[in-house]
Image (cartoon, rainbow, N blue to C red):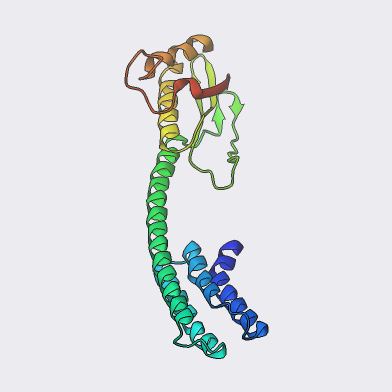
Amino acid sequence: MRSLRILRWLPFVVMLGVALTDLLAGENLVFLPLLTLGPAFASVSGGVRRTAAVGAVALALCVPMAVYNDLLFTFENNLTVVGIMGVTAASMLASRLRLQRERELASVRQVAEAAQRVLLRPVPRRAGDLQVALSYTSAAAEARIGGDLYEIVTTPHGVRLLIGDVQGKGLAAVETAAWVLGAFRRRPTTRPAWPTSANGLRPAWPGTWAGSSSSPRSSPRSTRARSRW
């Protein structure tokens, strides 16, 4: 959040620094072209309107700076104005494309998170003679989509516990985790011993394990799971 605030104010700080440097340097050194840094930085975190507003501020600063340096209506100043307008237009386009991409990623993320919440349902407080407590923390603070999976099932043959992780992230990993969890929830109730139950997961897999040509995008070989009962 703090870095976002810094990025939002960075264009104005840069343009103010350019103006002050130009005033302190005198008429011998001209820093007008550096005003294009304002709209360029604005496109990193701001929207289209904000980028356009920063470009307008850059043009407004360009006029008094040109007067101070006796460059008003000269070829050099006109070229600077055209440069500011061109960079502002390009930055607005870049900002629009960035926002569009962020919306698409947010939509995909919401779908994947909803699917993962359905898959990783809450575990019971008690399973057989066991008291169960669960704490799930992602390895990365922002990584909430992936192939993490866990389940506990009480069967007539004992308590079955599955803890696993699919390599990769996104919808492909969620899809693979869904197949593993679905097979695990169906098989343990009909298999008395865990080795038989683990082997029983294989026929439920629609890909390599079952010999089918259609398989999820994540390879079943990338699924690493450890289990206890």
In the visual, does 187 lie left or right of 27?
left
Disc tally is 0
Q: Quadrant of the C terminus?
A: top right
User: Is residue 125 placed above or below 211 in the rendered structure?
Assistant: below
Q: Nearer the viewer, residue 23 or 51?
A: 23
User: Is residue 154 placed above or below 2 in the rendered structure?
Assistant: above
In the visual, does 205 lie left or right of 128?
left
Question: Image quadrant of residue 215?
Answer: top left
Residue placed farthest to the right in the image? 24
Q: Position of residue 82 (x, y in %)?
A: 41, 75
Q: Residue at x 39, y 16 (%)?
A: 208
Q: Residue at x 62, y 81 (%)?
A: 22
Q: Position of residue 46 (x, y in %)?
A: 47, 66
In the visual, does 153 lie left or right of 140?
left
Q: Position of residue 107 (x, y in %)?
A: 38, 50
Question: Image quadrant of residue 159?
Answer: top right
Q: Nearer the viewer, residue 130 or 4?
A: 4
> Could one spot residue 50 in this view of the protein?
no
Q: Residue at x 59, y 67 (%)?
A: 6
Question: Image quadrant of residue 16?
Answer: bottom right
Q: Quadrant of the N terminus?
A: bottom right
Q: Nearer the viewer, residue 97 or 153?
A: 97
Q: Residue at x 55, y 34 (%)?
A: 125
User: Is residue 136 placed above or below 204 in the rendered structure?
Assistant: below
Q: Position of residue 187 (x, y in %)?
A: 42, 17
> Could one spot residue 159 in this view of the protein?
yes
